[in-house]
Image (spheres, rainbow, N blue to C red):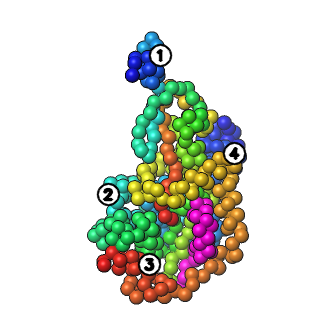
Amino acid sequence: MNSTLLRKKLHFPSDLTIMSLMKIKLHHPAREVTIKGPKQAGLLLKELNLSKEAHLVILGEELATEETVLQDDAVVEIRPVISGGLL
Amino acid sequence: MKCRRCRKPAVIKMARHNTSLCRFCFIFYIQDQVKKAISEGKMFDRGEPVLVAVSGGKDSLALWDVLIKLGYRTAGLHLNLGIGAYSEISQRKVEAYAESRGAELIVHAYQEVYGLGVTEIAEESARPPCSACGTMKRYHFNRIALEKGYPVVATGHNLDDEASRLLGNVLQWQEAYLEKQTPSLPAEAEKWARKVKPLYRLAEREIAAYAVLNRIDYIVEECPNAKGAKTLLYKKILNELEEASPGTKHKFYLGFLRRQKDPLSLKMGDVKSCASCGQPTQGALCAFCRLMERVAK
């Protein structure tokens, strides 16, 4: 991968000034991704192709509504709410 | 976004009710829906002891929390299924919750009693894991409730669980199951404890939100045996419908309940005692003893 593509993928601006990015904790499987903010929680779910009926967005320890704006330095968890198996 | 009731900042939007609520009003809503379910389903009276089946997941811990806060007499029953780290973490979450609330907890570990976890029991009996697990849970809930003097067992089944189960039963035309798909199954002949589902009016997302708002530390990870379970597919489909048309799950399941013929007078059929364990059954041996017979072979 050339340096321009790498910078783009890591969301670095062209002058290589490091910006903070939202850290998004995901489950099933457990992983973490970073995304450029600010962004509304509802849009974040849409961007990650996650159902808003099946997930909660948690900012710190608090619930974020669809309209909550998540800033660049936010620590966000997207928690699935669906459990399965035979009932 | 403002709370529809008090105009304070909202913490959750519920499209199915076309409303948003603040923390205080949302917790009031959850408690109110549980009270309504208990009352409409004639589930239990205030003085009756209730055994709450607690897995360590959001639904059962949230149910226990609501019942404790509403002042009901409860104890928790945790079945340790013996599924490695998943079961160990689940038990720790339940124990931590019980300790934090000073609540009584009964723990029953399959590995200690049978020398096998539910996954091994399913393998040895050639049954799908969720099917063997369901049989074992129903048996132990009933047996332990009656042994410990609890006339009622409450489980954390929610609206999504019931709607997905209804979809599965309709797709397969399981008429016998449809007849018994009610949030309040009656006790029978002192052999079956009443089985009740006080969360049936609440969506899974609402219950998870309640758990987060009340700082209930539950196991978020999915049971490893549930991977590929049909219920997950049904829930996914129902959630797609719900997003396109809010209120679909609610109308589907509560509409079904309204069409049932007097579910509170449901009879469990001809109840006998299992020849092996004495628990109620409609055959010679109960489903649990038949399962364990297959394991022993």
Q: Is disc 1 in contact with disc 2, using a CB cutoff of under 8 Å?
A: no
Which one is in front in this view, the residue at disc 2 or the one at disc 4? 2
Dot label at residue B19: 4
Please determine whether, in this image, residue B285 is positioned above or below residue B22.
Answer: below
**Residue bearing the label numbered 2:** B84
Element at badge 1? loop
| Magenta extent | B163-189
Residue at image location 57% in from the left, 29% down from the top: A39
How packed is label 3: few (under 14 Cα within 10 Å), some, or many (20 or more)?
many
Q: Residue at x 40, y 18 (%)?
A: A2
Indicate which disc residue A13 carries.
1
**Residue B34 drawn at (x, y percent):** 60, 60
Residue type, mark 4 in image: Thr
Residue B109 x %, y %: 34, 66
| Chain containing mark 1 | A
Estimate the x, y position of residue B37 in percent, counting from the top left. 63, 64
Q: In the image, B246: left or right of B199?
A: right
Q: Residue at x 41, y 21 (%)?
A: A6
Kindly identify the amino acid type of the residue bearing the numbered disc 1: Pro
Q: Are marks 1 and 2 on the same chain?
A: no
Kind of element beneath mark 3:
helix
